[in-house]
Image: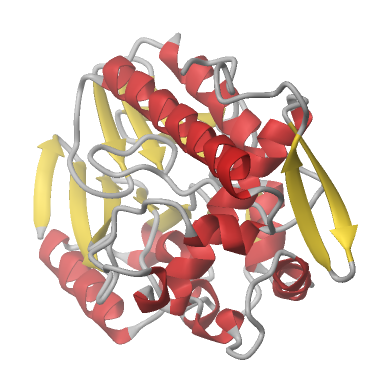
Amino acid sequence: MVEKILPGLYRVEIPIPNNPLKALNSYFIISKERNLIIDTGMNRPECRQAMEAALEKLGVDLCRTDLFITHMHVDHSGLVNYLTTDTSRVYCSEPDALIINGGDYWDKMREFARISGFPQDEDAIMKHPGYKYASREQVDFTLVTEGDRITVGDYTLQCIATPGHTKGHLCLYEADKKLFFSGDHILYHITPNISLWADDDNPLKDYLDSLDKVYQMDIKLVLPGHRKIFEDYRQRIGELIQHHCRRALEIVMILEKEGPQNPYSIASRMKWDLSYDQWEQFPIPQQWFATGEVIAHLKYLEDEGKLSKELAGEQLIYRLLKNRKAQGVMDNGS
């Protein structure tokens, strides 16, 4: 689907088969001199076909087209090499560009998953869509950060750093038109996954801080990476904050009732908005996303002084600290 939003600005739906996200919103900004594609879709045939159809329908010349990657997740970056030409610039933050270009990212995740209690009988990494459908070639990125500007025709886009969903997540703000390309920072109907598979970051705190930052901005229209375009962004930000307050409260209540546990065990006891009756029925990637989200909330609660953790044998065990009951688990609310 190709939808005209404003003169020179289009939303293109790129399908994400067999995935709860359903589709990616790729945005095309078209001008006489240069074009810009914001996010790409996965490196798989269905995505390539949809992208090719949109390029043909809109008459986009890739030799005059640059790309902006809001963050490293494969549904936003997988087709970057497929679309890049020798005359293209590919904009991305440094932290996420490093991950797209490889390194030991997946190995570190695998090891932290092991000590978090994730079963090792099936290799979740090999089933992970972020591994299966990634670009396999190095990308020559043009690195951008907070405050950098990209001009395409009548659109002047300012980079807004919004870490949380990923460490280097960037949004784009068009001040004159009050447009906000939110990537996966703010979504409608669904909540961005805030995951952690390490012990040296606090992505949930970063995410909440980034929400507060965007709340102060003057925005007329939010153009997200998935689902519908929307206007009432401040209300949506409040809903997202409350969602994470409820998640944190649920974790604290599980630890109160069940006692110390590893992250995978906690995730298996939580309520998730998926169409399965039991945790064991969740596909491995969905168990992975759920456990990663639990770890992010555990890290937040630990840094807030609500929990402690220890490495017992070869597993991380989290316990509720004495006198830390379920009330007021997060400063933002519940």
In x, y percent, where is residue 151? 43, 33
* Residue positioned 36% across, 42% down in the render: 191
Work out whether residue 294 or residue 37 is closer to the camera in this orientation and state it.
Answer: 294
Is residue 157 at least partly visible in the picture?
no
Work out whether residue 70 or residue 261 is closer to the camera in this orientation and state it.
Answer: 261
Classify residue 333 as left or right of residue 182: right
Number of numbered labels in the structure image? 0
Classify residue 256 as left or right of residue 171: right
Is residue 283 at least partly visible in the picture?
yes
Q: Is residue 231 above or below residue 21?
A: above
* Residue positioned 53% across, 37% down in the render: 253
Q: Is residue 275 above or below residue 334?
A: below
In x, y percent, where is residue 334? 46, 18
Split into 4 quadrants, where in the image is the N terminus? bottom left
* Residue positioned 42% across, 45% down in the render: 192
In x, y percent, where is residue 123? 61, 87
* Residue positioned 27% across, 63% down in the render: 20
Name the colour scheme.
Answer: secondary structure
Q: Is residue 229 above or below residue 173?
A: below
